[in-house]
Structure formats: C-alpha cells, structure tokens
Image (cartoon, helix red, strand yellow):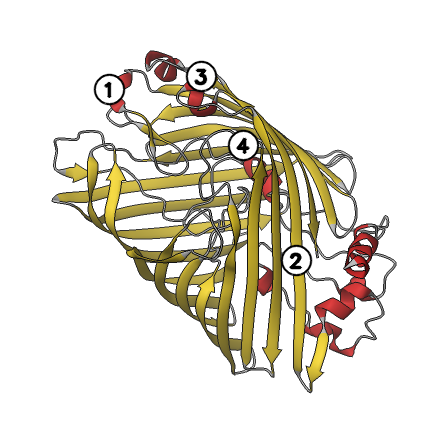
Amino acid sequence: MFEIIAAAATLAAAPLDASAVPQAMPAPTDIAGQSKAEPVKTGDTDLQNHPQNRDLPYDEDYSALRNSDRSSLWAKLKYIPIADSTYLTLGGEARTRLETRNGQRFGRGAQDPGDLEFRFRGWADLHVGEHLRGFFELKSGLQQDYSVPQTVSDRKDVDIGQAFVELRNPIGGDGTIALRVGRQEIGIGAFRLFDMRDGLNVRRSLDAARLMIAKGAWNGEVLGGYAQNETLTAFDNSTNENFSFYGARLARKAQLGPMASTIEGLWIHSDRKGAVYAAGSAAERRNTYSLRVNGHGGKVDYDIEGTVQDGRWGDQQVSANYVSANASYLLDGSWKPKLGVRFERASGDRNAADGKMSTYFSLFARPLTLNGELNRANMTIFGPSLTVTPTKKLTLDATVNDLLRTTTGDGIYLGSGVLLRGATEGTSRQVGVRTTLGARYLLSPFVTVGAYYNHVDAGRFLKQSGNGSDLNYATIFATFRL
C-alpha cells in the first residue's frame, strides 16, 4: 500500500516543462468539470506520447507504448503486456472539492452551508488482440458535513461505474466497426443530450448497447438501452426498465468555407413510464431529433444545435424544441483573450389546456453549471464570456448570463428535473442574472487545481414567488488523474 501511495505522489509531482501544451478550454460554466488536456510534453520520454486525457477514459489509446521501453511508472501502468498483442491499461482519478453555498434553490427549503466532497474512480482496460476488449471501472462519491438530504448525484458509496465488452473489426484501410455491450458512460456531441455528469460528484452510466462505425470522414452508430435506478448505497444500482431509449447518430467532418467543421445528426426515442412535469405525471414516449454543426477556422469557433421533439405524454401530444448557439473570437494579446457569446432557448408548456406537452426534455444532458441549479426546460439564456490564459498552465474565465423563462406559462426546474417554482407563482419572465468565475491551474501532467464561483442575482419572478434570495456557490478543487 505504501508503495502505491509513494508511486502516486511521484506521478503527481512530475514536472511540466515550458513546452507543455495548455489544457483545452471548456465552456465557462463547465470549467471545473475537468476538460481535457492536450498531449503533455515533459522531460520524460514515455510522456512524449501521452494521449489526450479524455472525458471518457475508454477513448484513450496507449497502444503506441508497445514499442517503448516504458521506463516510467506511468508507462508501465498504461501498457502492461500480457501475451503477444494482449495488454492491460490501468487508470484512475481522485478528486476532492470544498464547497460553500447559500441561497440553495433560491432560498426555498432546507439549506446547507457547505461540504467536503471526495470522488474516486479506478479502471482497467483489457485488450485481447486487435478485436476483443473489456473495460471495468469502480466509482465512489463521498461527502462530509452535508446537512440536507443527499441525491444520487451527490453521493454513491461504491458501485460499478462501467463494465462492458467490445468487439472490433477493421473496415478497409481507414474504417472500423465495433459492438459495445454493457454498463457504460456515453458522451455524444456537445454533451447536451448524452453526458457523464462529470461536474457533479457522482458520474452517470447507462446500461446500453452501441454498434459504432467509422469510415473516412464519416462516423455513426445505432444505440439503445436503459437509464439506471441510482441509489446512495453500495453496489445496488440497477437497470431502470421504466426508462428506455434507442436511436441512431450520423456525423461527417467537412470543410464549410474557411471552417473545419463537423455536421452531426441524432435521433433518440425515449420511453418513460412516469415522466413528471408541472402538469403532473404520465407515461411518455418522445422522439428527439437533433442537428448540430460546429467548427473552427482562424480565430473563430462556433457551435450551433437545434432540437425538436414529438411523441405522446399521457393523452397529450409532445411538441417541444431547443436551440443553442455559441461562438467565440480569439483576440490579439499575450494572454490569448477569447471573447464569446452564448444563447440557449428551450420550450416550455405555454398553455396547459391546449392538449400539448411543450416542456423540453434534455435526456442525459450536461448540467448548465457546476452546481446544477437550473434545468434547461423552459429557460432562455443569453450572455457574453471571456477566457484568458496568462500562462500555459493557467486558465481563467468569466461569464454573465441573463436567465429568463421562455414563457410565463410554465415553471422552472432544478437541474435534476424537479419543479422549482410553479408557473403561477409569478408573472415576470425574469429569473435572474448568473455570473460565474473560474480558474484552473495545471500543476503537473497528473494534477489540476482550481476554483469556481457561481452567483445568481434573483430576478423578479423568483422574488414574486417568495423566498427569492440570491444564490451563491463557491468551490476549490484538486484532481489527480492517472
């Protein structure tokens, strides 16, 4: 045990020299969600081939270490030869976060002044030849001094985070086909419909099957499965047969004028036995159709996604929609200032008596903020952002977002989907103004530290509803990722 601790300390202290490439910049509200690092370059020969630390560790490929002497402990763990082309990769994460807060749920209900969070993940990735693979991960999310009832995104004693097998075969010279079956985390596109919930303390997995094909500029998949019945206690998460989904995705890389872009279409059919909205609870069968285009060219980045939904909720017709548009421009300057703008609009149930359910349902979306105070449903969000990188190790960002009800005919929801304020509790559309500040510093290729602050100045609607206090959330965190 002491040898393992000593090895981890050695890795954590590994130097990052001046040639290190900085971490990629996430959306400002997701800064503490630990966006991915570019390939790390250090004085360690093995680490010259360090792959990008990805949201989903099963996307990391360490096969290039096969022909390395693997002199470092890191390389020895990332490529453990077993026989011929069979090898094992080990990895893990330990994250601690100190949180303070006031004005939870904008002053309504039980309040908690803060807590200390710990998250642990450990995984093993076994490659048997070129065609068979098994991936296994344990996860745990713990809290101390949390004085209100915990949710499944706050705490999980320990459970199987992922356990899947994958069969893979090449197609031609530049393609692959793969079938992945079992418990797995799924992240698609910009994570607005499928996300791992990384910013919160306990990540989310699904019980699913995916048939994935990539060929040249094209890639796509068909997928289907179930959500989970998540619990707080150990080893008892189970398949939620009351929440199933299936669908397909197709994407292509393209050059749109001066922009290197990706065009992605997604269709998902979801079936929930008890879908709860402000209007009540009923069985729901909903189709979600999404089209996303994102790209980069010169100093400009953009990401645009539009979504429409149809189906049935009880005896009502589903008719919902969502649009998101983000763009940024890199200004001149030694700190590489990047000025951005964000717009999101999700429909709500304007008229409960019109026979239509128009509240948008975002499936397994990434939370809007680190503390997930609001859901996208019936919300319109707009505002600027600024990101600067004073050094290659340090990233700072700030955002200001105006928060509005899309219509006055629907309430607003917590990030978990629970109704926060009913439509009739106020007449104004103005929910508030959110300001977020974030900082992230790369201590080494393995350790990131940072801070995040979210303040929501309560708007007229919250004050009309009573208990409309401002919300404040702050955290400092440290993450060790192997």
Question: Can residue 439 be seen from the camera position used here?
Answer: no
Mark 3 lies on a secondary structure that is: strand
Number of the front mark, 2 or 4: 4
Of mark 1 and mark 2, the one earlier in the sequence is 2
Whether residue 363 sits left or right of residue 199 in the image: it is left
Q: Residue at x 43, y 25 (%)?
A: 105
Q: Amino acid at mark 3?
A: Ala
Of mark 1 and mark 4, the one earlier in the sequence is 4
Question: Can residue 220 be seen from the camera position used here?
Answer: yes
Q: Nearer the viewer, residue 132 or 23?
A: 132
Residue occupied by mark 1: 424
Q: Is residue 184 above or below residue 453?
A: below
Mark 4 lies on a secondary structure that is: loop
Residue 265 is situated, as x and y percent measured from the top left of the image, at: 38, 57
Of mark 1 and mark 3, the one earlier in the sequence is 1
- CB atoms at circles 1 and 4 under 8 Å apart? no
Whether residue 350 sits left or right of residue 221 in the image: it is left
Residue occupied by mark 4: 146
Question: Label 2, label 4: how many angstroms apart (C-alpha)?
Answer: 25 Å
Q: Is residue 252 above or below residue 298?
A: below
Residue occupied by mark 2: 92
